Image (spheres, helix red, strand yellow):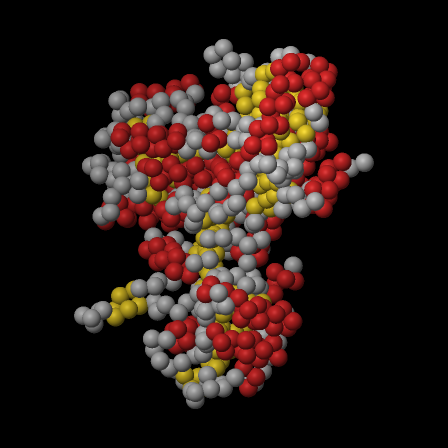
């Protein structure tokens, strides 16, 4: 039935504020937000099997309610090209997690298709104390972190609002294509913004949400990492 | 609609009691009562006025009452100027007397942490249906009915004995001021009075324990005299309500907002990127943009945009014509247009030919630039402005005109002001003007233009930003499909004397 409501109430029952990446991505999928294909493996053998099914290269990520900053914990290894690499990476990630936090509860290791490089954007949502659910859009990396080149709209938003968010950033010309870089699929970004709006409006328990990065291609987009924080 | 009507008693009460009226002339309770008494004796305030103070027999010839309950007959409105701890008792008495509105000037409530005290008066008022403005506010000024709860005396006497205007009350006009800060509110009154810009209503709402900025904006939507609303806020309590109301009001009347506290990046626990980047201020900007509220970057722009929107129709699109008699300031105006997203494109061939014809006929100087900007040069005369402005208005690609009328040139007098005014009144496109200078001729020129409803500014940049406000508001109305209707309504009101 409604997978999102189930995931949220389960997390609340367990006293967890940060959803697991697998949970966040499952919610995204339910709201037609495209995410990289993934499976949750319990051990190195399972990880290798899943990698075979997904196709190489893959990314492995630790999934633990006690580890929010996965990279800091050595919990992310990218560009794994065969079964052997996947197996040894999985062992290493589990070891790193133990070293980072011995008591950390481990849900498993995420095996994820590795999306090809492209323009990175960030789509976010935050529950503002005055205005409620609010959406954010920006280009990924330095554009967001250093230049703060982002636009906001109070949810819910229309497609027109979403388009204004995309065209409203200073770096918009980069999305339209420049030199040898082709234009990206702005409609796919608009879809994702509108779906994210629907997601946070339907689920007022969501306090913060990050789709970061979302890779945008000439056709289509893919969310590589999703984070959802509950109130 | 009944709720809107109920707020009328703030602005036009049949009877008002000033709680805490006193004979001590430097006290707020004295100034406020004196305002009412003076306006009553001038025949402006037509209702009954009652001073309330248990320690006085009479004030300024009016019989003083020890409490509200002892006033014979109805009391529609009260103004409260007693210490905070007595206010709950006053509100009980007001409730028993079925008072409709209470303006509570008194401070010492939520703003200093006395939340319970404030909640107590709100609860009492709610039960009785009394509406509260404030506390911790200046209340209302409405020139037409003589309601003036500003405790700041209009004049001050200097040590030399000279009496000077200190807190002027602007004349009647079309701009409403709705302000959270009382101090900034009266500064605004001083500024507008000095520039001879009239206001429709002044409302300082302070702690907004009951009536909020949103409800006041909604009230002003139905106010016939108000054409534009200037809103000063530091925080907005019910964001969603604000969005809904502002979105409704801005389809009919422009709102210009000055939101202070830009640098304060709301303290948020940042577990996400979005949380870390989203300063409260950016979210306010988004909310304003979504609801069609024009956000002024600073005080100057706040007044400039308000004046432009009250006086001129919004622009259809964003291509502007610049008409000048001075090259440098013309370029400054073009630069500022472009930084604000307006374009200043070369005129169509048809328009260029019309200008060429005027040059050939000797109506314009041979060396006049006519590509846009139009530079009438140092040989400018009054007549040139009239014909040039007319040609520019006729060009369908021109959406608005910035006229720079620097008065220094020898053959230019003031005759052109009326003729440009007449030309402008035949078109539905906006025009703003600039003359630079702070001495007599500059002040006179700007004053005359303002009187004709053509907003004037002391710098080319100010004029360009004012035009940008007209363009951006036009774009918002167009997006919402009500630009044509707004313009036709606006012109109907403008052409009425």
Residue B141 vs B342, above or below: the answer is below
Q: Residue at x 25, y 70 (%)?
A: B157
Residue furthest to the bottom in view is B57
Does the rendering let one see residue B485? no
Place of residue B278 in the rendered image (x, y in percent of width and height, measured from the top left):
51, 40
Q: Residue at x 71, y 31 (%)?
A: A26
Q: Nearer the viewer, residue B251 or B25?
A: B25
Q: Nearer the viewer, residue A173 or A150?
A: A150
Place of residue A14 in the rendered image (x, y in percent of width and height, measured from the top left):
70, 44
Location of residue B322 by image quarter: top left
Question: How many marks overall?
Answer: 0
Location of residue B375 by image quarter: top left
Residue furthest to the left in view is B160
Does the rendering let one see residue B326? yes
Q: Residue at x 52, y 41 (%)?
A: B270
Place of residue A63 in the rendered image (x, y in percent of width and height, measured from the top left):
64, 31
Residue B199 vs A10, above or below: the answer is below
| Residue B493 horizontal side relative to residue A133, left or right | left
Residue furthest to the top in view is A180
| Residue A97 horizontal side relative to residue B448, left or right | right
Q: Nearer the viewer, residue B385 or B12?
A: B12
Q: Quadrant of the N terminus of chain A?
A: top right
Place of residue B261 in the rendered image (x, y in percent of width and height, measured from the top left):
43, 49
Residue B240 vs B42, above or below: the answer is above
Residue A78 vs B412, above or below: the answer is above
Q: Residue at x 58, y 53 (%)?
A: B238
């Amino acid at each position: 039935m409604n997978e999102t409501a189930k995931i949220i109430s389960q997390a609340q029952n367990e006293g967890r504020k940060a959803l697991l990446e697998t949970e966040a991505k499952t919610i995204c999928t339910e709201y037609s937000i495209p995410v990289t294909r993934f499976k949750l493996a319990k051990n190195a053998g399972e990880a290798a099997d899943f990698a075979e099914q997904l196709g190489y290269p893959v990314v492995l990520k630790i999934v633990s309610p006690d580890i929010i900053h996965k990279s800091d914990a050595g919990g992310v290894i990218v560009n794994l090209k065969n079964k052997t690499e996947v197996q040894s990476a999985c062992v290493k990630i589990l070891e790193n997690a133990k070293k980072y936090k011995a008591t950390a509860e481990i849900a498993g290791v995420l095996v994820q298709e590795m999306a090809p490089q492209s323009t990175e954007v960030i789509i976010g949502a935050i529950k503002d104390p005055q205005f409620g659910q609010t959406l954010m859009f920006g280009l990924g990396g330095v554009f967001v972190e250093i230049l703060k080149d982002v636009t906001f709209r109070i949810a819910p938003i229309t497609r027109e609002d979403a388009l204004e968010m995309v065209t409203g950033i200073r770096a918009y010309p980069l999305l339209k294509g420049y030199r040898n870089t082709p234009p990206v699929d702005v409609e796919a970004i608009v879809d994702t913004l509108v779906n994210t709006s629907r997601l946070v409006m339907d689920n007022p328990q969501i306090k913060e949400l990050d789709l970061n990065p979302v890779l945008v291609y000439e056709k289509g987009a893919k969310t590589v990492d999703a984070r959802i924080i509950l109130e | 609609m009944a709720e809107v009507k109920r707020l009328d008693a703030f602005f036009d009460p049949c009877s008002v009691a000033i709680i805490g009226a006193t004979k001590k002339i430097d006290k707020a309770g004295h100034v406020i009562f004196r305002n009412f008494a003076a306006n009553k004796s001038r025949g402006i305030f037509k209702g009954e006025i009652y001073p309330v103070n248990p320690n006085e027999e009479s004030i300024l010839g009016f019989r003083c009452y020890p409490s509200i309950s002892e006033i014979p007959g109805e009391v529609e409105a009260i103004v409260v100027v007693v210490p905070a701890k007595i206010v709950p008792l006053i509100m009980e008495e007001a409730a028993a007397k079925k008072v409709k509105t209470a303006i509570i000037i008194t401070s010492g409530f939520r703003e200093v942490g006395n939340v319970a005290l404030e909640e107590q008066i709100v609860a009492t008022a709610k039960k009785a249906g009394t509406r509260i403005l404030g506390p911790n506010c200046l209340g209302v000024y409405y020139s037409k009915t003589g309601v003036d709860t500003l405790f700041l005396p209009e004049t001050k006497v200097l040590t030399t004995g000279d009496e000077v205007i200190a807190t002027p009350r602007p004349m009647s006009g079309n701009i409403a001021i709705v302000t959270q800060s009382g101090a900034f509110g009266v500064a605004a009154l001083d500024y507008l009075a000095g520039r001879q810009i009239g206001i429709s209503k002044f409302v300082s709402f302070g702690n907004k324990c009951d009536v909020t900025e949103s409800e006041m904006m909604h009230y002003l939507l139905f106010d016939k005299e108000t054409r534009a609303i200037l809103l000063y806020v530091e925080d907005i309590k019910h964001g969603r309500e604000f969005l809904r109301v502002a979105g409704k009001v801005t389809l009919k009347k422009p709102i210009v907002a000055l939101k202070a506290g830009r640098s304060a990046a709301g303290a948020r626990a940042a577990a996400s990127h979005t949380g870390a980047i989203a300063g409260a201020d950016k979210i306010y900007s988004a909310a304003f943009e979504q609801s069609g509220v024009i956000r002024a970057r600073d005080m100057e722009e706040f007044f400039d945009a308000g004046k432009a929107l009250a006086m001129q129709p919004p622009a259809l699109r964003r291509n502007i014509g610049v008409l000048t008699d001075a090259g440098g300031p013309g370029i400054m105006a073009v630069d500022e247009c472009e930084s604000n997203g307006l374009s200043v494109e070369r005129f169509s061939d048809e328009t260029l030919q019309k200008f060429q014809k005027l040059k050939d006929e000797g109506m314009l100087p041979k060396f006049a630039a006519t590509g846009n900007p139009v530079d009438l040069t140092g040989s400018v005369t009054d007549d040139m402005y009239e014909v040039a402005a007319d040609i520019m208005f006729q060009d369908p690609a021109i959406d608005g005109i910035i006229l720079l009328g620097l008065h220094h040139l020898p053959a230019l007098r003031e005759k052109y002001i009326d003729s440009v005014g007449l030309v402008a009144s035949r078109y539905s496109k906006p025009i703003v003007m600039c003359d630079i200078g702070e001495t007599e001729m500059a002040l006179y020129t700007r004053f005359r233009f303002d009187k004709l409803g053509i907003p004037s500014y002391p710098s080319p940049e100010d004029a360009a930003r004012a035009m940008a406000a007209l363009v951006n508001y036009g774009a918002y109305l167009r997006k919402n499909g009500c630009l044509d209707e707004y313009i036709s309504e606006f012109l109907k009101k403008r052409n009425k004397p």
